[in-house]
Amino acid sequence: MNPSESTLLRAARWLAFGSAVAIMIGIAPSQILLALAFAALLASGEKLRLPRIRIALGLWLLGTVISLAFSGNVTAGLPQIRKFYVFLELLVIFSLLRKVEMVRLLFLSWAGIGAVTAVRGFVQFAAKVQEAHRLGRNFYDFYVGERITGFTSHWNTYSAEEMFALIMLLAFLFFAPGARKRLWLWLLCGALAAIAIVLGETRGIWIALAVAVLYLAWFWKRWMVIVAPVVVLLGIAVSPHAVQERFTSIFKPKDVDSNQFRVVTWRTGMRMVEAHPWLGLGPEGPKLHFDEYVPADIPRPLPAGWYGHLHNIYLHYAAERGIPTMLVLLWMLIQILVDFWRGLLALPPGPGNRRFLLLGGIAAVLATMTEGFVELNLGDSEVLTMFLVVVACGYLALEKDLAFD
């Protein structure tokens, strides 16, 4: 650190770092550290900075407030307004983590914690195998609704956290200078995270991660794009029967799988959008009014599944906040991809920290957008936090005055 830097500013940097890392342990410690980082940032007098998506982000937040104001049930939608707090992560990371050493350490810390949470997941998996056996239940039918969660409260959050950690670790290993140092350790962390994702059996994450890995492989060694699918198929062939069943359920679902209930949520969401295209039902509206919009031709009882949201970020936000606000979100996501791609084109060939952050950032955004077709992933505070950290660090790589080379 700069020796002339104040103690308060130095503390703010490490508090922001701590918030970004602690999200893999729990949302409470991360958000406490976020509050402290923001307070220290304000007190330090350091300039507040937001990346180029600030206009789109501002319009997204404004669209949410307008939707709430016209929803007719302001109180019910307030949790989504309180979630605005999470977006402070983008500000504090972009304002404070302006040293490449801290950014590299952040993503390597994700890899290390991801390995620890993976081991916790393995223990949980073994316990669930034993429990299914004790109850005399078919393991697959038992496990689909009782999957491993690591330190989180839900298996989708757990798998998404492992996915972000693995994507950024792969980008580091493929494109960052000096990545071979302690290579064995990072390969071990990556392997543990990958196994945890497999055992998590969250199919949307599987598909999203495949998109991200193929993207990174294309820019690393293009022959890997051909080899990777073969390796995956071989891995499935030797995997436990429950994993094989989960993979085939993408195409041939069983009664316990979530394919059919997602059709119900999507059809219901379309009816919501048709009825309220401009401002939506308001924050939390799809959950509160779901039964009112279920198509009449869908038999009751509904297929087993979670009907608290629409399991698609594009459809959900259109139904909740209106088509214009959803399009602002899409604009923001596409702008991130375009900005990062343009930054890549300006880089010299060869390994570099900017290259690792930009390629990793694009891969993470593509994964988020892909999984967003089947899950409300950006509605999860843990997932949103990690997404914002990756985006902030990608935009840091575009800052020409920072010594990231």
Image (cartoon, helix red, strand yellow):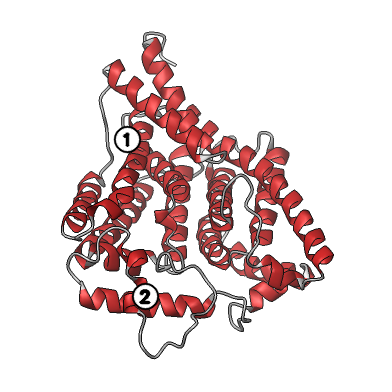
- Other-residue count near label 2 (Cα within 10 Å), few / some / many at <14 / 14–19 / ≥20: few
The kind of secondary structure element at disc 2 is: helix
The disc placed on residue 367 is none
Which part of the image, by quadrant, shows the C terminus? Answer: top left
Q: Amino acid at mark 2?
A: Asp
Q: Does 204 sit left or right of 313 as displayed?
A: right
Q: Nearer the viewer, mark 1 or mark 2?
A: 2
View extreme (top): residue: 4
Residue 120: image quadrant is: top right
- Residue at point 62%, 43% (across, down): 114
Nearer the observer, 290 or 23: 290
Q: Is residue 338 above or below residue 211?
A: above
Q: Which label sits on residue 291? A: 2
Q: How many marks?
A: 2
Q: Amino acid at mark 1?
A: Leu
Q: Residue at x 34, y 74 (%)?
A: 269
